[in-house]
Image (spheres, helix red, strand yellow):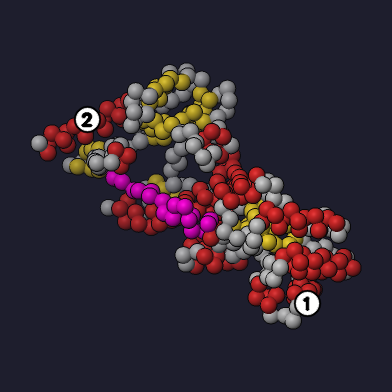
Amino acid sequence: MEAQLIETALLNFMNFQTLIATKASRIKQVAGNDMLLEFGTRRAQEADAAVWGARAAYIAGFDATSNMLAGQKFGIPTKGTHAHSWVQSFASEQEAFNTYAKVLPDFVSLLVDTFDTLKSGVPHAIETAKMLESMGKRLGSIRLDSGDLAYLSIKARKMLDDAGLAYVKIVASNDLDENTIFNLKAQGARIDTWGVGTQLITASDQPSLGGVYKLVEHEMDGVIVPTIKISGNPEKVTTPGKKDVYRIIDRVTGKATADYICFPDEEKPHDGLRLKLFNPQHPFLQKYVRNYDAVSMLVPVFEQGIQVYELPSLDEIRDYHKEQLAIFWPEYLRKLNPEFYRINISEKAWELKQRMMAEHMEEEE
């Protein structure tokens, strides 16, 4: 009953943030070493989603957020630019840029597409940059938020360089995701920083994550007995019983080979133990490994109602994500046609699952 009480809250926390962190991680893999800014607050489903989504994005490798509350709450670096309305509220674009630069001379990023990016925005930004140089300051960046970002960034880069402003960065936004960024890079876009909002904070290509929380054993008359949930969808049939989970790391390559699920009373996988790995959906797909390290993936958080786990800092979680991602082959991480990472169960776990399914089928006859 105690475990049941936390189901809804736990799934709410884990599903949303795992979803956004996964999307952010895919964007990070495509962006490489380019700076990534989380710009999703205005398009998030509601206020909490914006704040916690910014946290998830930072864990997955984003460099900063425009959400000031997330910055205050979690210590995430904050960055942003002015809005189009700032430019529209002045008599001229040049006046708007100069005023903004005088107010925030150390953090100037100018949005250059309010009227015409190449004929108006970039030339006026160059004039503001010259003004800042006369003050002993530098323009940080210009931002492109509409139009053909590849073409505009190439042209804007040349205009800036010709004006002696090679140090000025180019920021791009406008419904970006990993696919758009990949294509823009392939087209030679001269973009240094990517501001990603709507597509990230809503995980638009998959707006929900179907994580579940299922009972695998319970006490009956003082005895712990396994239980199973059966479904017409094979992937929804649960594996009964309390389990341990290990990540199998090849000692030669240092890369992850598979995850291995077994019962606590089984012999723990260790170097020298010939370990059989097979797909529970397709048992005929199997292989053996021997030269490996088995890393336990389960860590106690509460024992007898007492927290025994020391919570890591957000930056420690971020570093852990980066380290763990590095142990997977690129073939598993690519967006198009990836190889499937193996999730394997022990023969004992598989046999119990098959037996309990058969018993339920017999009871229904």
Q: Residue at x 30, y 29 (%)?
A: 350
Labels 2 and 1: the sequence-earlier one = 1
Q: What label does residue 59 carry, if any?
A: none
Please tell me whether residue 205 belongs to the stretch shown in magenta: yes
- How busy is the neighbourhood of tag 2: few (under 14 within 10 Å), some, or many (20 plus)? few
Q: What label does residue 95 carry, if any?
A: 1
SS for dot 2: helix
The answer to whether residue 324 is above or below residue 195 is above
The answer to whether residue 365 is above or below residue 27 is above
The amino acid pointed to by label 2 is Arg
Q: Which residues are magenta?
A: 199-215
45 left or right of 251?
A: left
Q: What label does residue 355 carry, if any?
A: 2
- How busy is the neighbourhood of tag 1: few (under 14 within 10 Å), some, or many (20 plus)? some
Mark 2 or mark 1, whichever is nearer to me: 1
SS for dot 1: helix
- Residue at mark 2 to residue at mark 1: CA–CA distance: 77 Å
**Does residue 291 appear in this view?**
yes
The answer to whether residue 252 is above or below residue 188 is above
136 left or right of 81?
A: right
- Give the percent coordinates (x, y) of residue 80: 66, 64
- Give the percent coordinates (x, y) of residue 109: 73, 64
- Considering depth in this image, is 128 or 47 the residue closer to the camera? 128
The amino acid pointed to by label 1 is Glu
Q: Quadrant of residue 106?
A: bottom right
- Give the percent coordinates (x, y) of residue 290: 47, 19
Count of numbered circles on the image: 2
